[in-house]
Image (spheres, grey):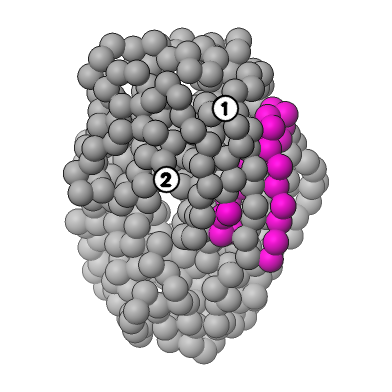
Amino acid sequence: MLNRITIKYPIKTFNKKIRIEGDKSLSIRWALLASQAVGKSTSVNILKSEDVISTLNCLRKLGTKVKLFKNKCEIHGLGLNGYKYRSNLKLDAGNSGTLGRLILGFLVHTNKNIRIIGDKSLSRRDFLRVIEPLKKFGATIISNNGKLPIKIYGTQNAQPINYFENRGSAQCKSAVMFAALNTKGQTIIRAKKSRDHSEKLFRHLRLPINIIKNKKIDLIKISGKKKIKSLNYNIPSDISSSAFFIVLTALTKNSKLIIKNVNINPTRTGVIKILKMMGVKIFFDNIKIYKGEKVADIKIVSSKSLKAINCPVHLNSSAIDEFLVIFLIAAKAKGISYFKNLSELNQKESPRLEWGSRILNFLGVKNVVKNNSIKIYGRPDLELNMNKKIIIKNFLKDHRVFMTSVIAALSFGGNWTIHDKNSIKTSFPSFMRVINIIKNKNNF
């Protein structure tokens, strides 16, 4: 079967209700914490992507009993410091930066060598950002100039640390939080604002965590050596995955869409705030709090007029995974949009800022990239001739480049060939199935 797709026609007007798969960040965090809990934890709607499967496979290698069914996952936790494994064990994080960085936090107490590897894309990414603070706990970590492969040999007497997370990286913060669970004493983290899924899970599990929120910095205090209770979790849908369909609806004339039961955690809704500023019509219905997370149905109505913005920098961390598809709204907006301080985009699976610019160039939309920033000169009349051929390939199998290209093709027309279809398996394996549901008559 060909690992590429061809799109020759823009999507037609639609009015649909859909459900999408579980939140990736929550799926991975749930699995890691469940493996260190006491007893059986069960999740419903866990994301069955390659990143999550890699997580479950790593946990199995660490001696954890994992059962994955059609509609749920069971993990029989071994308790804190309960992993059972052979010396020189090799764990493959695949393409998952979340797994590769977060699991190191649980391995600071290991008494045997463990080697962490990943695929070609992950092996290019920076791990020094987690290696440096985790060494302070007492672990010995040897890396390839701050990149994979990494060998870790832990300590049986991990010491609490003081740590300043100044990147706005939830992965760095979470790795330190997980490591803190295995210390005697209190770890203090001063963290730039970022996703707070780990904090909410800690609170729900009644782990000893104290958080003081300031305007730019959160002060987090964690006391270790407390048992983690089992966690049954119906994982809400992923807002990052939802963003592609929000943009598709906004750009498709006379269309409406409802996405059911989506995680709208305020640290993840930067994309919603940005798109609303640009004139996208987005509404929340059936809002509720579930195990600390804010969840709602998202309703989107197509937009007749989109406007350019100077994007506030403080929204970057809460929209970092969605900027590629946000750029498509800027391409259609009236005026010049400006997005700055986007260096974190190039710490992902591919240099995404560069790829965002390339896709805009294919669309014939003027843009200027400079100093980790991009100016996009919007074209409200943007529409491609059906004979204009566009080929997307060699993007390091970055799932978000693939999905953004699909949304661009369906929104603006043209004759597209988009390679590496299998890249979506890392985060959203049912993406094309949902696209087909929107295009056809049937709902879920």
Query: Vertical placement of 23 versus 54: above or below?
Result: below
Is 383 on the left-hand or right-hand side of 186? Answer: left
Residue 91 figure quarter: top left
State the quadrant of the C terminus: top right
Q: Is residue 340 magenta?
A: no
The residue shown at (63%, 65%) is 216
Q: Secondary structure at mark 2?
A: helix
- Give how far across and how far down residue 8 sits, in percent: 33, 61
Query: Vertical placement of 236 versus 406: above or below?
Result: above
**Label ID, residue 421:** none
* Kind of residue indicated by mark 1: Lys
Q: Is residue 117 visible?
A: yes
- Give how far across and how far down residue 265 sits, in percent: 67, 50
Query: Vertical placement of 413 versus 150: above or below?
Result: below
Q: Secondary structure at mark 1?
A: loop
Residue at which label 1 appears:
184
- Give how far across and how far down residue 423 sits, in percent: 31, 44
Q: Which residues are magenta?
A: 190-215
Is 37 on the left-hand or right-hand side of 362? Answer: right
Residue 150 figure quarter: top left
Residue nearest the observer in this picture, 263 or 120 = 120
Sequence order check, earlier mark of 1 and 2:
2
Residue at which label 2 appears:
133
- Give how far across and how far down residue 421 sits, in percent: 30, 45
The residue shown at (70%, 61%) is 214
The residue shown at (33%, 81%) is 370
